[in-house]
């Protein structure tokens, strides 16, 4: 009986088991989750980020830099084409390349000196004898400076012309400088020598012309770039990072960015081009940059009364205004300065090199990472330090993709822009050609141009929404040579601010200017952007930028000897920027914080109120609508934050995450007004547009109020009111996009 | 034994059953499909559409119309406020209302006659005696015309002023008409009488002023509106639908749409307003509309030579140019015409009434359905016929939502716009205030203003992408009084064209003008839009519009007696437009066909080539880039069509449908260029912007080429080239948004 019961029990269990099996496998359970479910809810993989950080290789960055800087690679030259090929070779590599890589060419208007008729600056006596000639080339300390492809120093887009006149010293070439000078002497027919800084390159000539100045020389004062040091016997490069006496900063002397002949249109064959004479924002008179060695020889001979204290530089002489002209005691007495300049414009084909890793879940959402490729000479720091970093980030990610180990949620696009040095041309043409697609789909743009100015600390600027993700990434990366000090902890020591929400935090700068290729993305397209680099300890130098900037000394030797020996700062930037890139590409929720935007807007409003409110009210204009708009924005941001906090995005419908991400992605777009700044090409972002006023608030409002204050004209106050309404509507509109009670 | 075996067998079955239950319910199967899965893949429910069609009630539409037209409801009057309350009452109804409904007010600049000092037009003899006075009010046939709230006929935004001069007849007031007239006599100091048609209202005065004309009268010739009939004894309303002799078409005499003081800014308290004297596109000289009875009394007395054949109208007299002034044989010999006009501008609060049904799956995607609410007088046809239809559509849908039977996939927004008659003001302010949100999220805008002009056939215009969904909807609805003839089959008989892709199909018009509230949506926001109504059999009348348009005769009696007795055409429009609305709101895939856009672009290119290519080439401008862009667009559209065809959206990831829908939703956005038409407020869509040229192609190109042809100036040909590049880039950009190889 026992046996029978046992048997029967076993049989019963067996039957039960069969039943369970049938029940589990044999009957459809409604429907089961489809295979794509887990992909859609996947979030950033912290293990992958740790792997990425570990795999970023300083030696590979160094080798990238060596290859990129073998020859001068000014835009559209043979050297530039060599870098195009180098990018394509890397990004099309079977094992470490991207999904696809290709070039895109634009036919753009550049400006070059004439190789057969070099620009010439001389001092000519009353008897028409040349008594002094400015160097045509920088002095060679290594073979690099002797390369025939080193372009003669010149002012790109400065006009050709032959002028002759008495020399005057005009400080930085600001409008106020010429006014000061003009108060003591007649500037008509003079040549002004000015130093870099204080005003934009083109403005030094644009400001001069109305006073009758007929030519301008520009130089870099050792006070501003070399902490006063001047001797190439032992003080300047190759003995240090400082600029040798013959070094000359080249540059684009053009105020607007993008191809000058095709504003708002991609510069293709057949595209309408404005007449060359209609280009605005370029020097109306001949202008030429020279080294401080030559500048000293001229300035220290000037007559006239001594210039003010803050016009003085490091030369061991009094900086005088000029008689106009040289002192009667000078060997140049009664001599003029002549500029014989032969710059000419040319239509040239400039290439962007593009590379892409397609997104797995949201291929129609783009994270773009870019830097320009063209330099003035060898461009080791500017821009190749950034390109070397970009190549290394792409290599580590490409390798994972090729090995089938990873694919980002969103599409990653790498852009190696052409002709940036002539005014951000490659990136601007790209933005113009793809304006619709980029506006509709781009989550963020990351710019790393010069990746290492110096090796003290991280520096970052960007939209307030990305502050958080930069912090997160920088907390996960250690500074060079340390196992315990994070980039974040180091950064906060060098540059910090007090946030109402967070207390003491590193200072993330604003993207108000057009200093690099982020300009088209932020200002024209309204894409949330950030810019990252490693930079100076400002307590140890007052150099306005690294001294070899835009000179023939910005070489691999310079970079590896003085800027970042061992390339560990480059590695740190690559780790940090790459970490940000992965988080933007892989986050189920975009790592954007809209409440941080509210903090910035509140700060702008209180700055505006402090600086302008009394006078606005006196002119019948109220700040209340603006204040109300910012309050509305804060409320909406808080509400969206709460929605995000209360959401379980991994388990909610995939459209829920998409919906919130679209709100975050498009937030910066809501600040665009294409008609707000009719005279500034490409500036449409009413929060970050360029600003002349020193008041750090809404740029249109600040500049309009300053103008109205100066003129006192009713029409100018009306313009201030208009700009207030523009920014009020944009902020309200942005609040509407965050606030919507959806469901 | 048998019993035991049976028992044991039953026991075994029971155990098996328990096992099955455990296996099925007790054990997690990987993971099961979440509850939202089926919602996300749900498509349009054809049964719901049939229910909707059945439930649309002609009697309810009739009762809506009766309520809406009880009193005159010109914008911002007490009558307008009554309609605001009526909309709110309906849309906030507990059983048949929407999820939410509210009002939004804007402070806008309107123009009214002075009640205390009515506008006056007279004939004054040389002895300063008034010998004839034009009627101040339309003749009353019913109590409606006697309502003190009937606004005196006037030209809104025409200036106040008192002018006196000799009368001339200037046909339609086109620039060419004044030129013709000016060739035979001096227009200096004259008053011109012109008829409606041929030129915009304001243009009749704008064109006149440069010739020295000092005042304008406007009337509707019986030839153009009444098929020549003129007598109110038995020919005109209330005996027929024709305009009585004293009827006057009121209207906005303003070329730009939106509030005239706040272009691009929503007109709130505190918003910056331009000075009134800076308003452009309005009459520079006094202008007044009058009835044809008075016009006849004036025109038939004119002296001078006979006007050309095509200037003649239906009056039984010769239409002469004027001497200037009256014929010597006339009792008005040597008399002048005086205009004493007292119109004045006022800031008034105008309301939009909004209503919403939140979407279930994609609440952040909007389908907007709108019409204006304000009329000139009782406005039974314009606009209340459309509002009555909108209310009925909202009632049927609202009832289903309130009963828990249905909720659309996407959000449906209803808009009852204010102050349309003054220049589409309510819809324009709404577009300006919510520009970011609407641009980012709106799938389509449906406009039904005058829903029934006449009861012959459907008429539709819209973006090419919506042709298909209008066809589909119109095939499912039968014409009034038929069980078998569809709206589509009826439509194709009245208006058709040959499509390369489909053969003979009904003709869907283009949305090139700004005739109703779709203007801000199409032109300013680039939102795919359509406009639907029921209209004339053109073979039976040449009336330029229904004869009571903008007069005191556009009453419920007029509508129910002559336009749509039984309101079955209204019902047909409601069924068709509602069907389109449901399809746009519920389709898993948006019912947009991008290849139909390619067909239109190809047609525009071939029209442009035929009309302009030879002359463009002669001026060094090639059409090839444009042709290539259109080819690129066609290829991309074909590719997206194939992708859609090969997709199984119901079973693919929900982001796949969203991605394709985003491409379709944003297609029209890609044609926006905010800088293309700097002198035309709100026009940004480079395909559909308004056009002066008669060549039906890209408007910027056509107008620029015409200008260059006329002037022969190199700068004008350059502008033609620029517009070609603008449209080429927009089409290429649109192609990029369709083409992306997103794996």
Image (cartoon, coloured by chain):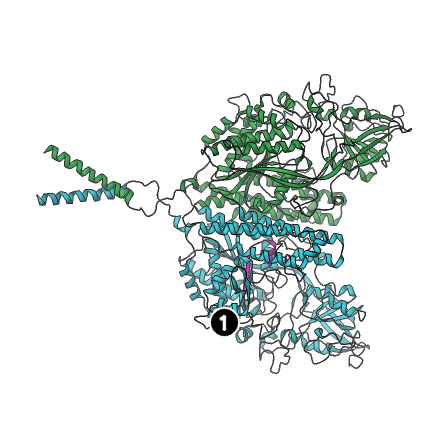
Chain colours: A cyan, B green
Instruction: Tell me the magenta residue range.
Output: A519-540
Quadrant into which the N terminus of chain A falls: top left
Residue A83 pos. (x, y %): 54, 65
> Considering depth in this image, is B349 or B605 the residue closer to the camera?
B349
Q: Is residue B124 left or right of residue A713?
A: right
Q: Which residue is mark 1?
A: A567
Residue A686 pos. (x, y %): 62, 54
Number of residues whose C-alpha sits closer than 10 Å to that of mark 1, classed few (under 14), some (14–19) or many (20 or more): many
Q: What residue is drawn where x is 72% and y is 54%? A: A618
B179 shown above or below B233: below
Q: What residue is drawn where x is 59% and y is 45%? A: B434
Q: Quadrant of residue B1?
A: top left
Q: Quadrant of residue A136?
A: bottom right
Residue A165 pos. (x, y %): 79, 71
**Res. B533 visible in picture:** no
Q: State which chain disc 1 sits on.
A: A
Q: Is residue A50 magenta?
A: no
A489 shown above or below B344: below
> Considering depth in this image, is A716 or A125 the residue closer to the camera?
A716
A321 shown above or below B718: below
Q: Quadrant of residue A254?
A: bottom right
Residue, far bottom: A233
Q: Is residue A532 magenta?
A: yes
Q: Is residue B742 left or right of residue A510?
A: left
**Res. A75 visible in picture:** yes
Residue A156 pos. (x, y %): 67, 65
Residue, far top: B234
Residue, far left: A1
Q: Give the SS element for disc 1.
A: helix
**Count of marks placed on residues:** 1
């Amino acid at each position: 009986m026992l046996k029978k019961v046992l048997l029967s029990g076993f049989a019963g269990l067996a039957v039960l088991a069969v039943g369970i099996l049938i029940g589990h496998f044999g009957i459809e359970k409604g429907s089961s989750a489809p295979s794509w479910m887990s992909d859609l809810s996947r979030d950033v993989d912290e293990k992958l980020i740790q792997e990425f950080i570990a795999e970023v290789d300083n030696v590979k960055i160094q080798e990238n830099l060596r290859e990129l800087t073998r020859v001068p690679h000014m835009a559209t030259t043979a050297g530039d084409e060599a870098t195009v090929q180098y990018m394509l070779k890397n990004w099309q590599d079977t094992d470490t390349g991207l999904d696809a890589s290709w070039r895109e060419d634009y036919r753009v208007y550049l400006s070059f000196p004439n190789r057969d008729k070099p620009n010439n600056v001389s001092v000519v006596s009353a008897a028409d004898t040349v008594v002094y000639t400015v160097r045509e080339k920088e002095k060679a300390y290594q073979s690099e400076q002797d390369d025939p492809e080193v372009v003669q120093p010149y002012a790109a887009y400065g006009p050709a012309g032959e002028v002759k006149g008495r020399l005057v010293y005009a400080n930085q070439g600001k409008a106020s400088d010429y006014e000061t000078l003009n108060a003591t002497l007649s500037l008509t027919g003079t040549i002004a020598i000015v130093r870099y800084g204080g005003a934009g390159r083109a403005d030094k000539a644009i400001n001069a012309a109305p006073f009758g100045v007929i030519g301008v020389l520009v130089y870099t004062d050792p006070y501003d770039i070399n902490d006063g040091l001047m001797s190439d016997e032992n003080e300047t490069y190759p003995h240090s990072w400082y600029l040798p006496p013959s070094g000359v900063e080249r540059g684009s002397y053009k105020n607007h960015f993008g191809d000058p002949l095709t504003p708002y249109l991609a510069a293709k064959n057949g595209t309408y081009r404005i007449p060359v004479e209609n280009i605005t924002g370029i020097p109306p008179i001949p202008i030429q940059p020279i080294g401080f060695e030559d500048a000293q020889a001229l300035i220290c001979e000037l007559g006239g009364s001594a210039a003010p204290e803050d016009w003085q530089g490091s030369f061991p002489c009094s900086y005088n205004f000029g008689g106009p002209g040289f002192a009667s005691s000078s060997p140049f007495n009664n001599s003029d300065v002549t500029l014989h300049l032969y710059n000419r414009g040319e239509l040239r084909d400039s290439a962007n090199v593009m590379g892409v890793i397609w997104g797995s879940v949201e291929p129609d959402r783009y994270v773009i990472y870019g830097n320009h490729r063209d330099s003035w000479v060898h461009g080791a720091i500017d821009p190749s330090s950034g390109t070397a970093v970009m190549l290394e980030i792409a290599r580590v990610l490409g390798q994972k993709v090729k090995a089938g180990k990873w694919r980002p949620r969103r599409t990653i696009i790498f852009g190696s822009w052409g002709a940036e040095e002539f005014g951000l041309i490659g990136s601007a043409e790209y933005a113009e050609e793809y304006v619709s697609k980029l506006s509709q789909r781009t989550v963020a743009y990351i710019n790393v141009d010069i990746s290492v100015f110096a090796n003290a600390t991280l520096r970052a600027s960007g939209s307030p929404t990305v502050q958080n993700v930069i912090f997160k990434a920088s907390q996960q990366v250690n500074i060079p040579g340390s196992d315990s000090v994070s980039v974040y902890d180091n950064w906060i020591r060098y540059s910090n601010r007090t946030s109402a929400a967070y207390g003491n935090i590193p200072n993330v700068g604003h993207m108000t200017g057009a200093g690099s290729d982020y300009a088209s993305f932020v200002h024209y397209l309204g894409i949330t952007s950030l810019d990252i680099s490693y930079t100076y300890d400002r307590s140890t130098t007052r150099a306005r930028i690294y001294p070899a900037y835009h000179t023939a000394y910005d070489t691999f030797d310079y970079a590896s000897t003085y800027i970042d020996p061992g390339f560990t700062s480059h590695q740190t930037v690559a780790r940090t920027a790459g970490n940000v890139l992965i988080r933007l590409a892989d986050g189920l929720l975009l790592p954007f914080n809209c409440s941080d935007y509210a903090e910035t807007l509140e700060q702008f409003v209180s700055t505006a109120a402090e600086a302008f409110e009394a006078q606005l009210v006196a002119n019948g204009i109220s700040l209340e609508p603006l204040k109300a708009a910012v309050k509305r924005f804060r409320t909406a941001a808080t509400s969206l934050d709460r929605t995000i906090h209360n959401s379980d995005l991994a388990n909610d419908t995939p459209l829920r995450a998409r919906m919130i991400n679209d709100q975050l992605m498009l937030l910066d777009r809501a600040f665009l007004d294409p008609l707000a700044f009719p005279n500034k090409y490409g500036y449409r972002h009413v929060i970050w547009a360029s600003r002349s006023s020193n008041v750090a608030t809404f740029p249109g409002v600040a500049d309009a109020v300053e103008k109205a204050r100066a003129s006192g004209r009713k029409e100018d106050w009306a313009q201030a009111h208009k700009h207030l309404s523009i920014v009020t509507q944009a902020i309200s509109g942005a609040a509407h996009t965050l606030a919507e009670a959806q469901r």
